[in-house]
């Protein structure tokens, strides 16, 4: 399980280093596991695409807290997206988990999504597949008893960098594993 120190760094570094790690969601006695294959960095109050742009609100308050917390929010009134708070307390940086490669519990993920294909190749799809909702907002993912956590995985050597999806600026803050079939489109 990754510890708080892992997340207590610059969001760009964390975004790249999460690639190849394993995202685990425990439901009852089952573990749903996926390899993180795509992330996006959101860089605080100076980043127009970041929820912290313009300052602290009730919605983004978790981003100002301790690193290693889940920041889960609703977008377009439909999708709940999973982020992890980075940097240090008071610095609102977070990494969006955009896609995972399903490894364990695929049948549960498929049931949760009502599909057998394209289970986790997008941020809304993966939260639905893993059963992650705003109920997990603020969850400390570095605690042993957490239902969501990250474990170390493969060290990734070939990382693509591109502009974030759905964001007007052209900042190259989207990172994904080269030639991975589970990256979002």
Image (cartoon, helix red, strand yellow):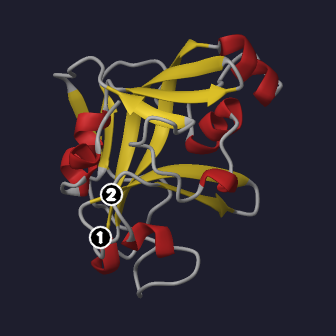
Q: Residue at x 83, y 25 (%)?
A: 114
In this rendering, position of residue 119 left or right of residue 112: left
The Cα atoms of the two marked residues, 2 and 1, are separated by 7 Å
- On the image, the x and y values in percent for residue 46 come to 28, 79
Q: Judge whether 34 appears above or below 95 on screen.
A: above
> In the rendered structure, which disc, 2 or 1, sits on the residue that comes first in sequence?
2
Residue 147 drawn at (x, y percent): 57, 36
Whether tag 2 and tag 1 are in contact, CB under 8 A, the answer is yes
Please give left or right for residue 73 compared with residue 149 in the image. Answer: right
- Residue shown at 31%/35% (left/top)? 2
Q: Is residue 185 visible?
A: no
Q: Quadrant of the N terminus?
A: top left
Q: Is residue 29 left or right of residue 23?
A: right
Q: Which mark is residue 89?
A: 1
The one nearer the camera, 49 or 130, is 130
Location of residue 155 in the rendering, given as x and y in whole percent from the top left corner = 20, 20
Is residue 16 visible to the viewer in this orientation of the structure? yes
Mark linked to residue 21: none
The structure residue drawn at horizontal position 34% and vertical position 18%, both measured from the top left corner, is: 179
169 or 58, which lies in front?
58
Which residue carries the number 2 mark? 67
Quick one: SS at disc 2?
loop
């Amino acid at each position: 399980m990754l510890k708080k120190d892992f997340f207590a760094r610059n969001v760009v570094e964390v975004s790249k280093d999460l690639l190849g790690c394993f995202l685990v969601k425990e439901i009852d006695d089952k573990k749903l596991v996926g390899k993180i294959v795509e992330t996006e960095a959101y860089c605080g109050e100076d980043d127009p695409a970041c929820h912290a742009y313009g300052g602290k609100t009730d919605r983004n308050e978790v981003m100002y807290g301790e690193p290693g917390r889940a920041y889960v929010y609703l977008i377009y009134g439909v999708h709940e997206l999973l982020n992890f708070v980075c940097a240090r307390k008071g610095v609102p940086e977070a990494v969006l988990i955009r896609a995972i490669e399903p490894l364990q519990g695929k049948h549960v993920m498929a049931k949760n999504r009502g599909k057998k294909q394209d289970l986790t190749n997008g941020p809304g799809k993966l939260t639905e597949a893993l059963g992650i909702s705003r109920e997990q907002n603020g969850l400390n993912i570095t605690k042993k008893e957490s239902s969501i956590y990250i474990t170390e995985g493969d060290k990734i050597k070939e990382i693509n960098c591109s502009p974030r999806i759905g964001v007007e600026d052209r900042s190259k803050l989207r990172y994904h594993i080269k030639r991975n079939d589970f990256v979002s489109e």
